[in-house]
């Protein structure tokens, strides 16, 4: 949806990474100034222009050109900057037109990285002006918007910059014009398309995350007792990503930085402002041997995406090789059974040793086939284990176990990762091998940490008190991870703990100060938090449906929200239960997520009313349990929660950093 | 390759075939008359059935595109055929090295899902290709082959350490591979 702006009109920007495309009938200079909340440009270093084309989060062309593409990453723009003004000017002293009235009306468009237009503006009505502020991008209540300005200056760049309270305006304007003149003198005759050169913007703009991976990864068997529809595969055609361990995929083409006006041949529709890191080199395989596994050996635009695809590839490979093994063993079993039946039913076998011989033969055939199948499985497991050994240490925090050293080097990230590790998965045939359970962010379903009595696998006795504590600790570990992998202020956690029974387990969240507010207690607390979040869902939905996201009230917090509910249904009346169901249904699409720490039995008084709620949540357990199915074959995988190693302070350390970043972000 | 002929998939140099592809191609029915939308499309489907000792274990067809073990993959259903340029409109890829140890035969079939006989379908063919080098091992012309709606094309089966392919080319009738089971069993 393109908004065609008129002068003075504004439009919300939902993406931080943008391109501003400028086209004019003649070569023009494009630049940008940054100003603080009082509109002040602090100095020449706050101006991006051909002589100094890059600023944090912003890059302009080095030359005058009829077409420009300015790269903008609003997330990377310093926090003190409240306004980015995009300016255009006619170059002086090069014999070109000296007033905008003599050239075609400049056209400016704000587009996403995929080229989709967000807003556009044709600057009409210019006459004697030789410089113009075309657009401004500005912060409003924590979100960015664009406004069509179209303010022209007959006095050129110097007057424009002076109007922005820049003391050295005249000097800078001369500098810019010099740089442009030099650039024109240096440049080869312009290609017909004008200047298409574009350097990489300073901040690493992230990956195009439109991967081909399945998006609804896990079916649960636990909630409804029903086996989920297995594949996330579209009915016809599409395939889940499959994985070829030894194949070195060619690295995504990295844009070479175009030197001074060189032509950049990269595909404009696939523009990644940061070149993806090259794929790791794959050592040549020994003949007859599988190649050495390498972390990141999968397709993707970033290391994050490659590792994500690689982990999913390992997951599928393990599911399939285990399917082959189980199928072979089943067949061997049924064949032996049939043969033994024949031996029994054959009267001749009752005489002498014939029966024994036939029985032994059947058993030997069985053993031989099972051995063969096991050998194949072991070969594949060896390969996958070797791969896991290199992949696990290479994982970024969002994908890594809590005992991974990467957490000790933790820093609050600048971008949300594409996925999150919710735990580990394994199968009994391949017990030591763990597959990270990665789900895409933002979460598509709420989470349910089941504090009910499990069918515990290890046979250990858990009394219900222990389980409750474990469940809440698991929830805290999940919440801490979610907080840690989001940029400061992008993720807000609310807690409802009606009886205050979770105080001890919640301490890491409460004491480090990463929560929006202390855990809500009592029926009043429940009502208040649910009411606030329900209202938020309503507002955002209305705004989205009406296409009027600027109409959100002032001070509106645009971050993703997570609500942790402990001890459900304690403290919930019917109205609160309905609000909770509403949040579970409608929340995820507008960034409100639910994490229930609950025993379904305790809410059984509500009867089938709550079944849809439980079904809509992804059930996780605080102790290992085999309740998750893969999307290809439907094996029951044993899930293990991602708990912090006993005695480790990593959770506190990470949360302390998150809290500090949140405080400085709030300032 | 003629009907009933068997070729070993062992290569002369001692190596063996590692991957084969069954390709199926046909031409979309021409549109005719005023009501172009009323011409009947032709939907042929390729399937592969995996057998262990004459028991069907797994089937790869348009509803189940990848065998559970991952060794046999269908490239996806094509509902209308191609333009008759000779390319494969549906293909099934078999990674012979990854086939589970108990699977000893794989049978490839073609069915006319929309019910036209092969007489009514233009330029229909199916073929088996050595996926490693693109060499065509067997090719059948289905079009004009008679009033049948299905064909049991070929089977690959284990012989010693390697695989052998036998061309079957048996005509049959049926909408999906399930209908063909009685016709397949004698060939196992």
Image: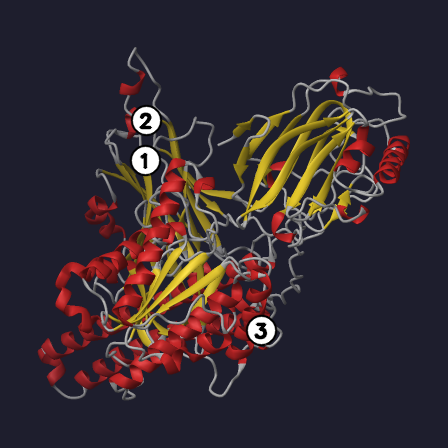
- Quadrant (top left/top right/bottom left/bottom right) for the C terminus of chain A: bottom right
Q: In the image shown, does A551 or A271 lie closer to the viewer?
A: A551
Instruction: Say above or below: A454 vs B97.
Output: below
- How many C-alpha atoms fall within 10 Å of the one at disc 1: few (<14), some, or many (≥20)? many
Q: Chain of mark 1?
A: B
- Whether discs 1 and 2 lie on one chain: the answer is yes
Secondary element at image label 1: strand
Secondary element at image label 3: helix
Q: Which residue is mark 3?
A: A393
- Whether discs 2 and 3 lie on one chain: the answer is no
The image quarter containing residue B43 is: top left
Q: How many marks?
A: 3
Q: Which mark is residue B121?
A: 2
Secondary element at image label 2: loop
Q: In the image shown, does B165 or A485 lie closer to the viewer?
A: A485
Distance from disc 1 to disc 2, alpha carbons, whole Å, reads 9 Å
Q: Chain of mark 3?
A: A
Image point (81%, 46%), residue name: A44
Q: Which residue is mark 1?
A: B44
| For discs 1 and 2, the disc positioned in front in the rendered view | 1
- How many C-alpha atoms fall within 10 Å of the one at disc 3: few (<14), some, or many (≥20)? some
Distance from disc 1 to disc 3, alpha carbons, whole Å, reads 48 Å
Residue A178 coordinates in the image, percent (x, y)? 90, 35
Is mark 1 in CB contact (under 8 Å) with mark 2? yes
Image point (57%, 25%), residue name: A6
Image point (77%, 44%), residue name: A47
The image quarter containing residue A61 is: top right
Residue A442 coordinates in the image, percent (x, y)? 44, 56
Is mark 1 in CB contact (under 8 Å) with mark 3? no
């Amino acid at each position: 949806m393109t908004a065609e702006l008129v002068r003075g009109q504004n439009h919300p920007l939902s993406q931080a990474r943008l391109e501003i495309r400028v086209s004019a009938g003649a070569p023009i200079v494009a630049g940008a100034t940054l100003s603080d909340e009082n509109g002040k440009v602090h100095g020449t270093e706050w101006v991006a222009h051909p002589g100094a084309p890059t600023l944090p989060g912003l890059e302009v062309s080095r030359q005058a050109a009829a077409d420009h593409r300015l790269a903008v990453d609003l997330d990377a723009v310093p926090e003190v900057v409240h306004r980015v003004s995009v300016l255009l000017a006619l170059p002086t002293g090069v014999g070109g037109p000296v007033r905008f009235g003599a050239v075609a009306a400049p056209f400016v468009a704000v587009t996403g990285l995929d080229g989709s237009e967000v807003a556009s503006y044709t600057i009409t009505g210019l006459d004697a002006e030789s410089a113009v502020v075309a657009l401004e991008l500005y912060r409003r209540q924590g979100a960015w918007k664009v406004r069509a300005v179209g303010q022209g200056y007959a006095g050129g760049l110097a007057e424009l910059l002076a109007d922005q309270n820049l003391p050295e305006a005249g000097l800078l304007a001369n500098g810019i014009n010099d740089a442009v003149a030099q650039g024109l003198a240096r440049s080869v005759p312009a290609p017909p398309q004008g200047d298409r050169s574009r350097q990489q913007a300073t901040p690493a703009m992230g990956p195009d995350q439109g991967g081909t991976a399945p998006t609804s990864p896990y079916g649960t068997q636990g909630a409804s007792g029903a086996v989920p529809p297995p594949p996330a595969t579209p009915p016809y055609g599409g395939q889940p990503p499959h994985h070829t361990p030894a194949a070195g995929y060619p690295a995504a083409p990295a844009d070479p930085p175009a030197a001074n006006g060189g032509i950049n041949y990269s595909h404009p529709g696939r523009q990644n402002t940061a070149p993806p890191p090259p794929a790791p080199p794959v050592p040549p395989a020994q003949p007859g041997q599988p190649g050495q596994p390498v972390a990141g050996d999968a397709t993707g635009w970033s290391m994050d995406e490659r590792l994500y695809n690689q982990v999913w590839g390992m997951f599928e490979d393990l599911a399939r090789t285990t399917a082959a093994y189980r199928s072979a063993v089943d067949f061997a079993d049924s064949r032996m059974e049939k043969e033994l039946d024949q031996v029994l039913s054959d009267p001749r076998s009752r005489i002498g040793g014939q029966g024994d011989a036939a029985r032994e033969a059947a058993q030997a055939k069985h053993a031989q086939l099972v051995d063969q199948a096991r050998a194949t499985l072991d070969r594949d497991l060896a390969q996958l284990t070797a791969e896991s050994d290199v992949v696990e240490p290479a994982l970024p925090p969002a994908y890594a176990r809590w005992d991974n050293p990467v957490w000790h080097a933790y820093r609050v990230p600048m971008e949300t990762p594409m996925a999150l590790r919710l735990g580990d998965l394994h199968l009994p045939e391949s017990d030591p091998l763990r597959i990270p359970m990665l789900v895409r962010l933002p979460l598509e379903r709420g989470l349910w940490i089941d504090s009910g009595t499990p069918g515990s696998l290890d046979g250990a006795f858990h009394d219900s008190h222990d389980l409750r504590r474990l469940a809440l600790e698991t929830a805290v570990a999940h919440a801490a991870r979610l907080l840690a992998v989001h940029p400061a202020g992008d993720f807000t956690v609310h807690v409802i703990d009606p009886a205050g029974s979770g105080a001890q387990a919640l301490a890491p969240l409460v004491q480090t100060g990463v929560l929006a507010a202390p855990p809500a207690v009592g029926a009043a607390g429940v009502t208040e938090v649910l009411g606030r979040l329900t209202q938020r869902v309503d507002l955002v939905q209305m705004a989205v449906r009406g296409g009027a996201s600027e109409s959100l009230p002032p001070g509106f917090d645009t971050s993703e929200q997570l609500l942790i509910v402990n001890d459900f249904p304690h403290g919930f009346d019917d109205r609160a239960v309905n609000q909770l169901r509403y949040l579970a249904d409608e929340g995820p699409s507008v960034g409100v997520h639910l994490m229930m720490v609950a025993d379904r039995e305790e809410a059984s008084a509500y009867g089938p009313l709550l079944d849809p709620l439980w079904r809509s949540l992804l059930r996780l357990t605080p102790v290992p349990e085999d309740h998750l199915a893969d999307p290809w074959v439907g094996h029951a995988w044993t899930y293990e929660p991602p708990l912090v190693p006993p005695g480790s302070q990593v959770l506190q350390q990470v949360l302390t950093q998150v809290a500090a970043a949140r405080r400085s972000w709030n300032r | 390759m003629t009907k009933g002929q068997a070729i070993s998939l062992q290569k002369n140099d001692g190596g063996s075939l590692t991957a084969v592809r069954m390709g199926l191609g046909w031409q979309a029915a021409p549109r005719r008359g005023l009501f172009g939308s009323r011409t009947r499309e032709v939907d042929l489907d390729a399937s592969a059935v995996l057998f262990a000792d004459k028991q069907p274990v797994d089937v790869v067809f348009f509803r189940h595109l990848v065998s559970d073990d991952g060794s046999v993959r269908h490239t996806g259903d094509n509902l209308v055929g191609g333009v008759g340029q000779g390319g494969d409109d549906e293909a099934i890829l078999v990674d012979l090295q990854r086939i589970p140890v108990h699977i000893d035969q794989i049978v490839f079939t073609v069915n006319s899902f929309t019910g036209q006989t092969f007489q009514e379908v233009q330029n229909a063919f199916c073929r088996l290709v050595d996926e490693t080098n693109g060499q065509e091992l067997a090719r059948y012309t289905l079009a004009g082959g008679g009033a049948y709606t299905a064909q049991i094309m070929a089977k690959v089966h284990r012989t010693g350490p390697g695989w052998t392919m036998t061309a079957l080319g048996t005509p049959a009738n049926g909408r999906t591979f399930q209908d063909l089971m009685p016709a397949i069993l004698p060939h196992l």
